[in-house]
Amino acid sequence: MRIEPTVAGITAWLDAATNRERTGDFHGLRLDSVRAVLARLPRPPAPCTIAGTKGKGSTQRYLEAILLAHGESTLAFTSPHVTSVLERWRIDSQPATAVEVARAAEEVAAAEAASGSILSWFERTLGVAVVLAASRSGRCLLLEVGIGGRLDATNALDPVLAVVTALSHDHREVLGPTLEHIAREKLGISRPGRSLLIAPQSLPAAIAIDRMLPAGIEARWVQRPARALRLGMLGEHQQDNAATALAAARLLLPSFDAQVAEAALAEARLDARCQLIKLISRGGDRRILIDGAHNGASIAATIAVAQSQLRPGWTLVLGMARDKEIDEILAAIPANIRAVRCGYAGPRSRRDDDWPEGARPWRWHADVAAALAALPDGDLCITGSFYLAGEAVAALAESAKNLIPA
């Protein structure tokens, strides 16, 4: 099967498969099909697999930066993407090229056909990551779990190191109603005899993890840094992510250098993770903070950054998926914050009539472009779904040639 070496060609191949990210239906996850396909692909290096409710992508990015600073080659598999599907496969911190991805996709398609298995959209992207990681000897493979852990496609590979970032409530209809249920699913990425690293946790989450640790698994608990680290990403919550990345790097690197690692942390950035943009025009400047935040704890962290980085009178632009725990999210938003509701492309997007009564007084905009047009002045915090964040980044890039990172 030939796949056109363009974003459109790659997307067409992926879109021929079931996309749970778009439908929001994560029930019935199984590893049989992806294991059957992976068995026919080149063997990748044992990965560092990162699960958790919050901080997976940031922790992965910090670890990637540290490894690169030590001279290692990396393949980071991440989701979702912000503006281009190629972002899901970072080779040495840069998105893979369409040519590289298309060639890898052809191998995955051949293995899928030969095995008689039918992969999902996400499973196909994992297959591409495996081929790309195996294409260069010694490359470090960093896998970000899509949902849960135990039944996520990434768990078809045995990790050399499993990392669990901060836990809180999310996807409870799939993972289970309590933190204990969620911890069980996340801890499913661990393996006997392999290192398991636990990021700093809230007390309820730490208790849940301790109760649900599988037999024969010894966890290493990361401590919050005694002094503030200088980081390239905004927010106090990033201190825990960076500390976790440092601990992971110490386990992965035979010759870990703390000074080299900390210098890498100061430069590491990631789109739509409290990304602050300064938009300059003849009328002045405005600051726009863009972040993906999908539960109450994440929204609270984003608002804390907004309050420290944006000027008084800023507006919250919020767009969420229908399957997110909206009451918990709304409870995390202070009553004195000016807010509007916003839709985005995709079947999971919460539309005007999908919001609870408490948010109905907030003005509604069908998409982020309409919100930006209706809010021409003042600072903004655009947050919620990563799909909304991606549309915001794309809209700002399209409408202004003079975007300057703050």
Image: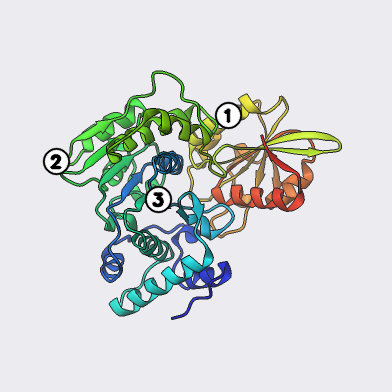
Mark 1 vs 2, N-terminal side: 2
Residue 398 x, y percent position in the rendering: 73, 53
Say which residue label 3 marks: 74
Say which residue label 2 marks: 215
Q: Quadrant of the N terminus?
A: bottom left
Q: Identify which amino acid the numbered label 2 is placed on.
A: Ala
In space, the residues marked 3 and 2 are separated at their CA atoms by: 32 Å
In space, the residues marked 3 and 1 are separated at their CA atoms by: 30 Å
Q: Residue at x 30, y 67 (%)?
A: 42
Q: Could you say whether the residue bearing mark 2 is in a helix, strand or loop? A: loop
In space, the residues marked 1 and 2 are separated at their CA atoms by: 39 Å
* Up-down relation of residue 93 to residue 274 (above or below): below
Q: Could you say whether the residue bearing mark 3 is in a helix, strand or loop? A: strand
Say which residue label 1 marks: 305
Q: Identify which amino acid the numbered label 1 is placed on.
A: Val
Mark 3 vs 1, N-terminal side: 3
